[in-house]
Amino acid sequence: MSGRDERLRRRWDRQAGGYDRVMAQSERYLFGDTRRWVCAQASGDVLEVAIGTGLNLGSYPTGARLTGIEWSPAMLAVARRRATDLGRPVRLLTGDAHELPFPAASFDAVVCTFSLCAIADDRRALAEMVRVLRPGGLLLLADHVASSWWPVRMVQRLTDLVSVPLSGEHWCRRPLPLVRAMGLPVERVERFALGMVERLAARRP
């Protein structure tokens, strides 16, 4: 792990205790029912990449067999407490989205919500998610993306000048073209909140 990566991981560790409160504002005003939209489509063996504090855990169907991976130990500790409080069986592992510690074709669904924006190499992370998907499996993504409205997009570009070096947070990414370039047919896609939020379901051939 590079020195920059270690610095960013320590930053996420420090934010773990207040992360849910910060996200609550975005959930209310931007993200809406996105967690439920994503998780309701996941079934069978499900991997959540960058599970964070486990905010999605209460939204999965009862029969889903959950595995979560997260590179911040402090975030993962919060997720473990949440899983216990919910009575939700889940295998939680510390790991890197760039190198998922699973064999190819291990999961029926892979979920990543509001996290690709902060993963250093989003293309590499997506390639890993596709690698561990079984043929016919669903890739389920949601994130804030570059707005479809140019004035907002200009503000996002200016924000990137500060947020990317400081916290690794990217505001002008958009996973959808990358998913299509990897050859996955996109079955559902929705974009809203001035085009700043996008959620999609794509299936591995």
Image (tube, rainbow, N blue to C red):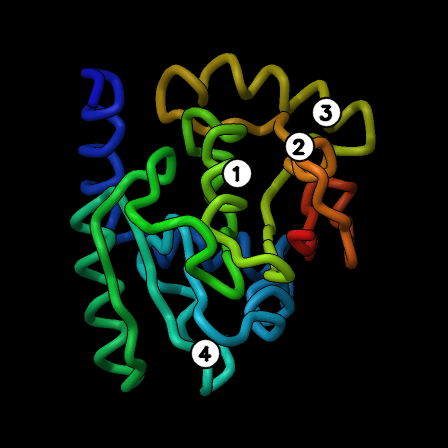
Which residue position holds label 4? 64
Find numbered disc 4 in the image and state the secondary structure of the residue it sits on. loop
Find numbered disc 2 in the image and state the secondary structure of the residue it sits on. helix
The percent coordinates of residue 163 (x first, y second) are: 45, 22
Q: Mark 4 or mark 3: which is in front?
A: 4
Which residue position holds label 1? 126
The percent coordinates of residue 117 (x first, y second) are: 51, 35
Q: CA distance from mark 2 to mark 4?
A: 27 Å
Residue 3 lies, with reference to residue 101, above or below; the image says above
Q: Amino acid at mark 4?
A: Ala
Residue 203 lies, with reference to residue 184, above or below; the image says below
Say left or right for 77 vs 59: left
Of pointers 2 and 4, the one earlier in the residue sequence:
4
- The image quarter containing residue 177 is top right
Which residue position holds label 3? 153
Find numbered disc 1 in the image and state the secondary structure of the residue it sits on. helix
Q: Are marks 2 and 1 in contact (CB under 8 Å)?
A: yes
Residue positioned 52% across, 65% down in the render:
108
Q: Are marks 4 and 1 in contact (CB under 8 Å)?
A: no
User: Going by the picture, which residue comes out furthest to the right?
Assistant: 149
Say left or right for 204 vs 87: right
Residue positioned 46% across, 35% down in the render:
125
Of pointers 2 and 1, the one earlier in the residue sequence:
1
Q: CA distance from mark 4 to mark 1?
A: 22 Å
The percent coordinates of residue 111 (x first, y second) are: 51, 57
Which residue occupies the foreground of this view, 20 or 137? Answer: 137
Residue positioned 46% across, 59% down in the render:
24
Which residue occupies the foreground of this view, 35 or 104? Answer: 104
Of pointers 4 and 3, the one earlier in the residue sequence:
4
Find numbered disc 3 in the image and state the secondary structure of the residue it sits on. helix
Within 10 Å of disc 4 (Cα), the crowding (few <14, some 14-19, many 20+) is some
Residue positioned 37% across, 33% down in the render:
98
